[in-house]
Amino acid sequence: MVFSSLVFLYLFLPVCLIIYYLIGSRIRSAKEIAAASPPGHATKAQNLILIAASIFFYGWGEPIWIALLVVSSWVGWLVGIWVEQAKTTTGKKIALVFAVFSNLCLLAIFKYSDFIVDNINYAFITGLNNPGFALPIGISFYTFQILSYVVDVYRGEVRAQRRFLNFLLYVSLFHQLVAGPIVRYVHIANEINNRIHTWSDFSQGLHRVCVGLFKKVFIANVAGEWAQRTLGGDLSTLSTADAWLGLAMFTIQIYFDFSAYSDMAIGLGMMFGFHYRENFNYPYIAKSVTDFWRRWHISLGTFFRDYVYIPLGGNKSWAFRNLFIVWALTGFWHGASWNFMLWGLYFGVWIALERLFIERLLNALPVAISHFYLMLIVTLGWALFYFTDLSRLVIFFQILFGIAQTPTIGLSTVDDLSSHAIWIVVAVLWCMPVGTWIQNHFDWCRVSKWPVSAQTLTVLATDLFLLLTSTALLVGQSYNPFLYFRF
């Protein structure tokens, strides 16, 4: 089940919310909280409802993988207690190594086994059969969440959770289970039993869901169809201009697809009393590759920083070695294919070059040039990300830089640009912090003594418009994937 489906929006989510709030604490207003009214803490029954809803959500398409999710959570829960109760440092380290080894083996079996066998066959000219395991949805995300929990318990940053159902709730929350963001236990440990439900959080969460949904169906899906038609078709018929345009569409798609999902995940969390960290911070307004990766998929970047880069020595020892290890792992995390490894190392090289001299040069250049440099590097990087077939990747780059014997401009280029002109303007503007400007405008209205209801009604009207428009688009669209479901 995906967030941008009519089943989720008009059946699963409303039913889940109704049952959740009927059996537990109601939502409190700001006045009630200020008046010291008993806060709307979560109840055990509400946690059980969330677990049941999350399991149902996860098993909607592939119920066979529910067992893997539950067993992985159970093992992670037991190891967390083992780490905390171990009497010696050696015992704690053994437990930690077991957690890391078992979780990485899980990924190796289900995500990388075919890739490993294929490369063994190629290198040693053998005929081993591929295991052919299907990729469980969300395995990369919930495996990292379990690992981060065990490491944090080992470091003493959080106490081990003693109730398995509470830990299962943390791992399986449907808001972030299948495509992130990667939520750390330490960030929501208190909210598992002590979260407070307020109308302010609920309304902000609903608004975030509506905005994310519209970004997904109005921007990401349109860009995705365009990119698929261009990059996924017969490359021999592609002009240079169409190649650049298709790559630009994929650049738009992957940002709006994943940031929309993160928006909806964060919004859904708020509707149920959870507060997740931001996962994107307008990465396409960055002025360097380093800055870009501080803004893009923040939860993954901070995971590798805190659990790989710093433990390896960070900037203090063998900084460039540590950097390339992290970026090789970052690429490999995204998929079992050499193009993802190349993609990760590609960004590792640029970040290393920025540390050596490019960053000083960028600081001396006009902002427009720095931004152009960033967008060129990132856009070319998305070509490495898109083409899992390296032979097609080589052909595409030949077309992109005019090396192949293809026309410079195709017949469809001008038509595509003219027919999508307004949409392109909206997509480009939405890559910028326009929402922040609007929020500041509403804050100014409130300071200017505008009625609070005017702001509230404006937001509600906006949400209704976004929801109804998105629904109409979903009814007419057949292309509606979430790219990060495959990672």
Image (cartoon, helix red, strand yellow):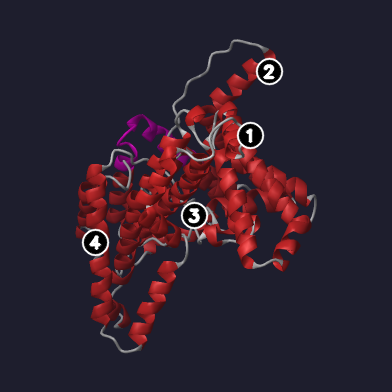
Residue 238 visible in this rendered orientation of the protein? yes
Residue at label 3?
Answer: 185
Residue 354 in picture, x, y percent from top left: 72, 56
Hey, what amino acid is under mark 1?
Ile
Residue 40 in picture, x, y percent from top left: 29, 68
Which residue is located at x 65 percent, y 57 percent? Answer: 290
Q: Is residue 467 left or right of residue 369?
A: left
User: How many angstroms separate mark 2 from mark 3 (CA)?
Assistant: 41 Å
Hey, what amino acid is under mark 3?
Tyr
Q: Secondary structure at mark 1?
A: loop
Q: Residue 157, located in which quarter of the rendered image?
A: bottom right
Magenta span contains residue 66: yes
Residue 176 in picture, x, y percent from top left: 41, 50
Q: Is residue 386 left or right of residue 36?
A: right
Residue at label 2?
Answer: 123
Q: Is residue 171 left or right of residue 38?
A: right
Instruction: Single out the residue that lies furthest toward the bottom.
Output: 449
Which callout, 3 or 4, points to the residue nearer the camera?
Answer: 4
Q: Secondary structure at mark 2?
A: helix
Give yes or no for contact between labels 3 and 1 (Cβ–Cβ under 8 Å): no
Q: Residues within 10 Å of mark 4 (few under 14, many from 20)?
A: some
User: How many angstroms separate mark 2 from mark 4 (CA)?
Assistant: 56 Å
User: How many angstroms separate mark 3 from mark 4 (CA)?
Assistant: 36 Å
Magenta stretch, overall SS: helix
Residue at label 4?
Answer: 465
Q: Which segment is the magenta one? A: 55-78
Pick whichever, 335 or 48, lies toward us.
335
Give yes or no for contact between labels 2 and 3 (Cβ–Cβ under 8 Å): no
